[in-house]
Image: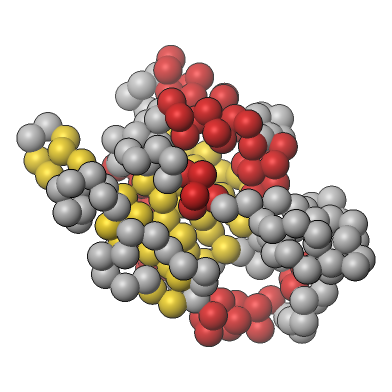
């Protein structure tokens, strides 16, 4: 189902409310999720609906020409910030983790195995699940920050992103992994937390 840019989350919540037996999966960009739809993101995190969000995070408004977006790193030159982006990017991990029952994962389009694992776990998660996927936009971002091709940008993800150490409770910059707490569903434990409500990286 397609809906207005920035309005994917309330529509997803409505679908899940009416058809609770469905696996509801949102595919949206960082501009949709964290800027135009940022208020919806805050309240979806708070309400903890059983939906999965796949955030295509290319750190730019790629479809409209390359303007600074909510996840653009500070100092990055864009069409709308020729002197460099003035502000720090939004902390998606920090926002999602304001709900201790939510599921957060960070991966990249290069790390296919990690992405598949995160998607599978997120769909099975009994509450709000958010996968932050670093993805390249070579024409409207990559070339401006020094990459000559999409392949070179992919290789940059390979070199720059490393798995978080086992047991991490938060992901540092350029780490991939999963942050969740132990959840008991129908008498069976799922997740790899310590059992005290703390997060666990995997």
Write the residue at 57% across / 24% down. Answer: 11
* Residue at the outermost top position: 18
**Residue 27 image position (x, y, % from top left):** 56, 44
In which quarter of the view is residue 145 placed? bottom right
Q: Is 81 displayed left or right of 134 in the figure?
A: right
Q: Is residue 24 visible?
A: no
Write the residue at 47% across / 44% down. Answer: 96
Q: Is 113 displayed left or right of 63 in the figure?
A: left
Q: Is residue 131 visible?
A: yes
Q: Quadrant of the C terminus?
A: bottom left
Please determine whether, in this image, residue 82 is positioned above or below residue 33: below
Q: Quadrant of the N terminus?
A: top right
**Residue 184 image position (x, y, % from top left):** 15, 38
Please determine whether, in this image, residue 75 is positioned above or below residue 8: below
What colour scheme governs how the chains and residues are painted in the rendered image of this protein?
A: secondary structure
Q: How many numbered marks appear?
A: 0
Q: Is 15 displayed left or right of 74 in the figure?
A: left
* Residue at the outermost left position: 187
In this view, the residue in front, 92 or 19, is: 92
In this view, the residue in front, 110 or 45, is: 45
In which quarter of the view is residue 22 placed? top left
**Residue 80 image position (x, y, % from top left):** 90, 57
Write the residue at 56% across / 77% down. Answer: 157
**Residue 163 image position (x, y, % from top left):** 38, 73
Write the residue at 66% across / 67% down. Answer: 136
In this view, the residue in front, 63 or 185, is: 185
């Amino acid at each position: 189902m397609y809906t207005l840019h920035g309005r994917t989350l309330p529509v997803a919540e409505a679908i899940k409310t009416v058809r609770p037996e469905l696996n509801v999966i949102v595919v949206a960009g960082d501009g949709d999720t964290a800027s135009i739809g940022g208020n919806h993101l805050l309240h979806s995190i708070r309400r903890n609906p059983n939906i999965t969000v796949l955030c295509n995070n290319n750190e730019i408004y790629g479809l409209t020409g390359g303007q600074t977006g909510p996840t653009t790193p500070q100092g990055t030159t864009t069409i709308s910030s020729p002197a460099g982006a003035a502000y720090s990017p939004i902390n998606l991990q920090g926002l999602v983790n304001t709900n201790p029952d939510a599921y957060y994962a960070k991966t990249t389009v290069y790390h296919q195995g990690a992405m598949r694992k995160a998607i599978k776990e997120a769909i099975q998660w009994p509450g709000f699940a958010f996968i932050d996927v670093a993805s390249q936009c070579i024409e409207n971002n990559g070339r401006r920050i020094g990459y000559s091709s999409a392949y070179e940008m992919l290789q940059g993800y390979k070199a720059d992103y490393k798995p978080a150490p086992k047991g991490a409770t938060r992901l540092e910059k350029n780490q991939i992994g999963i942050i969740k707490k132990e959840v008991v569903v129908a008498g069976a434990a799922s997740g790899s937390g310590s059992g005290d409500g703390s997060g666990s990286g995997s």
